[in-house]
Structures are given as C-alpha cells and as structure tokens.
Image (cartoon, rainbow, N blue to C red):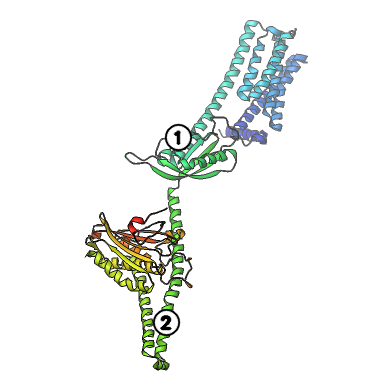
C-alpha cells in the first residue's frame, strides 16, 4: 500500500511539473490539462511497449503500417506541445489529426470504404467535446470529415492477411471498442461533472449559511436597478420576504425623495470598478399588529466582475444594505451637543459682555459719587446737590439689584428650583398695580402708557409673583424701546378657557432675522453675539428670557409679532387654572413669532394683523 501511495505521489508530482503555468491558477483548466497528458502519455507508453514485438513479428513495416505507427506517436507530441505552450485547443487538434490518420490507415488495411473502422471517425469529435472544449470539438470534426473523405477514396491495401477480417467479425470488434471508448469518456465526464456539482452545492450551502448569519441585506441587481435576488435578511431589515423585494419591490420602498440617489448609485457602481456608497430612507414593514417605520439605510454597491456590458436580466451589481438609523441618531445627537456647546459658549460671551456693561457702569457711579460725598469738599456742597448724588447712588443700586434678581430668576428657572406656588388671585388688580408702578418710568421717557383690562375678567389660579414679574418685564421692555411720544398698551382679557395678557408698543420693532433668537439669554435684538459696550439700550437681555421661562412654568404660550418701525406685540396666554395643567411645570416654551403690519394704540385688538 505504501509503495502504491508513493508511486501515485510521484506521478502527481511529475504531472504538476508538466502542467503549463497558464493553467496553474484555474483548477478546472488544470484538471483538463492533466487528463490530456495522462491519456496521451499512456498511449505513447503502450505503443513503445508493443512496437518492438510487432517489428520482430512483421519485419520491415509497410508504408501504411509506418504511417499508423507515426499517428500513434503524435499524441505524445501533442502532450509535449501542451506542456510547452499551454494551448489545449492546439494539442487536441494535433491529437485528433493523429487519431484520424490512424483510423484511415486501419480502414485501408481492413477493406477500404467498406471497413468497419470508419465508425471510429464519429468518436473523434465526441472525444474532443467531452474531454476538451467547443473549439477543440470543431477542429476534431473538421479532421473527422477529411478522414471520411479519405476512407471513401482510398484503395484497400492487399497482401495483409492478418488484417483481412471478415465483415461479420470486424464490425462487432470495431463497434464494441468504439462503444467502450465513448462509455469510458462519458463516465469520466459524468464523474467530473458530479464532482463539480458537489463542490458547487457545498459552496451554495456555505453562501446561504453566511447570508443567513449576517443581518445586512444582500441584493443582486440588473443593469436597470431591478432586484434579481435578495438575501433572507430582508425580513429583519425591511420586514418582508426576499421575494417581495425582487423586481421593483425594493425601489418602491425607498423614500420618494431618495430614489434618484438610489438609482444613480446603482448606475455608477455598474459602470466603474470602485464601490459606491449611498444613504437613503427605507420604508420597513412592521410586525404583526405593528405600524410600519422609516429607517435610514446605507447601501454599498459593487460591480460584478465581467459585467461591464451585461445583458438584460443578468446580474450587474451586488449591493450590501444595512440599517444605520442608530448611527444617524447618534450623529444627530453629537451635532446637537456640539451646537449646544457652541450656544453655551456664545451665552458665556454675551454674559461676560453684559456683566461688564450692566454691573460696572452703576458700580462706577456708586463708587464715584460716594467718594465725592465722603471727601472734605463735600461740606461745601449744598443740600440739593447731596440729595442729587444720593439719588444717583440709590438708582444705581436699584439697577444692580434688578440685574442680580434677573440673573437669579433665570438661574432658578433653568435649574428647576423656582418657587412655583399657584393660588387664586385677582389678575385685574395685579395688572393695574403693575401699570401704576411702570407709570413713573413711562412718564420719564415721554411714553403714553394705557391699560385695557376687561371688566369681566375672572379670578386666575397661578403664581401671582411670577405673573407680576412677567408684566413688569414686558412693560419695561416696551417702554425702553418706544421713543418719546409713542404708546404702550397693556391688554388683559379672557379668551375661552385662557387669559391673554398682551403688551403692544409703537416702538422701534424687531428685525425679521432677530425673531428666531428672541428669548435667548443675554440677547438683544439688533445686536451681534458679542455686543456689550456701546449698547444703545441698557439691560441684560434677560427680560424676555425670564418671561419665557415663567410662561413655561404655567404651561402657557408666548407669541411675539414685530417688524422694524411698526412696533411689537407680545402675547402671554395662560390657563385659567394652572394647577390643572398636565404634568409638572415645564421649562422655557417655544416662542411663536410673526411679522407685524402696523401697531395702532387706539384700537389694538381690531387692527393687529400678521403679514407673514
């Protein structure tokens, strides 16, 4: 057994050395080369073993016998040619020519045109087809036809009694040998095809197992983008069967606005060697009793090798699609966090600029006038001048207190520590008291302050201190930004199950570009992000921010309508009973903004209108 194994290994090693390098990388081509080399070299070995005894028996061979012997040697030459050039078609052609010559010689020795050896001509293209290629079969068919013509025109060679077989014996012998030869070739071809079929089946099973194991959807597309086949991952990704994605099934599930990008990616992938990646929204079906959903999918498409110009219905592109919704969500969260950090940095810059202006200015006044009162020269000042200095120090201290209170209120609202205590109170009386308080500041600025408080205003259950702070901040802003001779109106009325507090002024208004940023801490309309020194109006920019936070605590709504030179209207809508609002008090509410056509202080509710 060891000797046989060693001998087989030696033969395999010799064949490995004879196979041309051009066939070394292709297992199927290498197997065809090895079969050709084995059969032809075996034929040569048998001939060399039989030739000496035949010559001893026959003596000097005739011309026909010498030609037959040469034809038997040509397959060995064909094997050496194949090992040298790697051209299997040329080697098969030379071998077919040798077999054709041998058949013609046998026919000449066994009866000429009536010889049964002529049936072997049919076997020549059959052998080339089963053992070689279509081109080799075509070349062998040409040689077989030429051999048939030669058999038809040659004359039988006389004087060879050994080959003078009767037809009753020659026909079965040649027929049986031809049948056995074809049978051997067919069995070898069937065994070879069975081996490749088993390998293909095993590879298919491995591919199916791999496709079942991965969650990514694999699809095969033709040149029009239609799906020819889809992997089982269609159930987990798209919530449907693979058959439902075939044809235009996958395309119909792509979001309408993303379909051009989807088709463009497949087209680009089919026309270039580099893979193409595209992201699109995909409508995925839900489970039993569940609604469908829209996911973000990423597809990476590759061109199939050799499919540069595929026919219709042939695979041109293979694509791998995966669900990237979670990656998109995390990317959006990172973008939002980055934007929040940038906004926080901007708020910090505005805060520093505001503190620099709003705190240092009154502090300088307090320090300066207190030093003047402390100096010895103050004794020469009259009582009126000392009262004036004391009033300046008092107003500066009041301004500092307002700034600090605004900062503390904003901090409490943002941290959720604001002392929110809703209770029933008279909103009409509170509104009148705030108007009385702001009347002095309005008179100093030359602004007419009017009030329009409904007589049938019901009792409101809310935080009275917070409502008072909202009205003070809104009226203070309105008076501050209304030029001398302008009007400010406070309107309080009931609208269904809510109460509306509207502050309308005929002031400078707000530019449309600044409306989306209203309510941001330390932001004043018309000023840049870094505004601090040289501000046209004093204030921290926290007034509307505090109002926004307090409205959120009451689950109310805040609306701002304004346009440059047309005035501003701020509306606060609160529930009549803020204790009935669902959930706990919330944070700052979104501000609904719009453009104001024109503010008329005379008939405010009837003449206000939005233009955009």
Name which residue lies at 70% across and 18% down. 143
Measuring from the top left, give residue 540's x and y in whole percent.
41, 70
Query: What number is the disc on residue 365?
Result: 2
| Disc 2 packing (10 Å; few <14; some 14–19; many ≥20) | some
Q: Let me know if residue 564 appears in the view.
A: yes
**Secondary structure category for the residue under label 2:** helix
The residue carrying pointer 1 sits among few (fewer than 14), some (14 to 19) or many (20 or more) residues within 10 Å by Cα, namely some
- Position of 174 with respect to 429 (left or right) is right
Q: Which image quarter: residue 560? A: bottom left
Q: Position of residue 209 (x, y in %)?
A: 45, 38
The relative height of residue 195 versus residue 266 in the rendered view (above or below) is above
Determine whether, in the image, residue 464 is placed left or right of residue 58. Answer: left
Q: Position of residue 300 (x, y in %)?
A: 52, 43
Seen at 45% across and 47% down, the residue is: 324
Q: Position of residue 533 (x, y in %)?
A: 48, 73
Q: Are marks 1 and 2 in contact (CB under 8 Å)?
A: no
Q: Quadrant of residue 12?
A: top right
- Residue 164 makes an appearance in the image: no
Q: CA distance from mark 1 to mark 2?
A: 77 Å
Dot 1 falls on a residue whose secondary structure is helix
Is 364 placed above or below 548 here?
A: below
Quadrant in the picture for the N terminus: top right
Horizontal side of 286 relative to 40 (left or right) equals: left
Q: Which residue is mark 1?
A: 249
């Amino acid at each position: 057994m060891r000797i046989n194994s060693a001998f087989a290994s030696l033969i395999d090693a010799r064949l490995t050395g004879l196979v041309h390098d051009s066939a070394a990388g292709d297992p199927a081509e290498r197997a065809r080369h090895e079969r050709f080399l084995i059969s032809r070299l075996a034929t040569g070995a048998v001939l060399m073993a039989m030739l000496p005894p035949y010559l001893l028996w026959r003596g000097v061979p005739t011309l026909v016998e010498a030609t037959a012997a040469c034809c038997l040697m040509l397959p060995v030459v064909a094997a050496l040619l194949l090992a040298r050039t790697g051209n299997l078609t040329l080697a098969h052609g030379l071998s077919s020519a040798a077999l054709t010559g041998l058949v013609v010689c046998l026919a000449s020795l066994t009866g000429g045109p009536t010889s049964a050896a002529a049936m072997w001509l049919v076997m020549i293209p059959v052998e080339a087809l089963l053992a070689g290629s279509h081109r080799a079969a075509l070349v062998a068919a040409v040689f077989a036809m030429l051999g048939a013509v030669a058999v038809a025109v040659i004359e039988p060679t006389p004087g060879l009694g050994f080959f003078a077989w009767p037809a009753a014996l020659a026909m079965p012998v040649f027929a049986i040998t031809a049948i056995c030869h074809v049978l051997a070739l067919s069995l070898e071809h069937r065994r070879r095809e069975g081996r490749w079929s088993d390998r293909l089946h095993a590879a298919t099973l491995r591919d199916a197992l791999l496709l079942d194991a991965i969650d990514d959807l694999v699809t095969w597309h033709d040149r029009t983008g239609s799906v020819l086949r889809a992997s089982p991952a269609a159930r987990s990704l798209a919530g449907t069967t693979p058959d439902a994605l075939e044809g235009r099934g996958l395309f119909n599930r792509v979001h309408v606005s993303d379909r051009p990008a989807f088709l463009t990616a497949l087209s680009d992938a089919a026309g270039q060697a580099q893979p193409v990646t595209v992201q699109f929204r995909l409508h995925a079906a839900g489970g039993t009793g569940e609604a469908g959903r829209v996911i973000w999918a990423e597809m990476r498409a590759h061109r199939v090798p050799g499919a540069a110009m595929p026919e219709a219905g042939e695979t041109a592109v293979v694509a791998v699609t995966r669900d990237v919704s979670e990656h998109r969500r995390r990317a959006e969260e990172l973008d939002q966090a980055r934007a929040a950090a940038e906004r926080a940095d901007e708020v910090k810059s505005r805060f520093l600029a505001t503190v620099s202006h709003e705190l240092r200015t009154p502090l300088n006044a307090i320090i300066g006038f207190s030093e003047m009162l402390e100096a010895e020269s103050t004794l020469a000042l009259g009582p009126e001048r000392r009262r004036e200095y004391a009033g300046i120090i008092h107003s500066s201290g009041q301004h500092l207190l307002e700034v600090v209170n605004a900062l503390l209120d904003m901090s409490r609202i943002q941290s959720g520590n604001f002392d929110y205590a809703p209770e029933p109170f008279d909103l009409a009386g509170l509104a009148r008291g705030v108007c009385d308080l702001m009347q002095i500041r309005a008179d100093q600025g030359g602004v007419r302050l009017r009030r329009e408080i409904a007589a049938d205003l019901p009792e409101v259950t809310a935080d009275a201190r917070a409502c008072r702070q909202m009205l003070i901040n809104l009226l203070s802003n309105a008076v501050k930004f209304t030029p001398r001779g302008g009007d400010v109106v406070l309107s309080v009325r009931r609208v269904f199950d809510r109460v509306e507090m509207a502050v309308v002024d005929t002031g400078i208004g707000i530019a449309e570009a600044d409306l989306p940023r209203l309510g941001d801490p330390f932001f004043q309309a018309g000023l840049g992000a870094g505004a601090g020194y040289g501000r046209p109006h004093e204030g921290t920019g926290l007034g509307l921010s505090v109002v926004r936070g307090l409205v959120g605590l009451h689950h109310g709504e805040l609306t701002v309508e304004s346009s440059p030179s047309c005035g501003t209207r701020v509306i606060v809508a609160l529930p009549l009973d803020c204790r009935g609002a669902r959930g706990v008090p919330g944070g700052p509410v979104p501000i609904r903004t719009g453009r104001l056509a024109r503010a008329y202080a005379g008939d405010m509710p009837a003449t206000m209108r939005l233009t955009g």
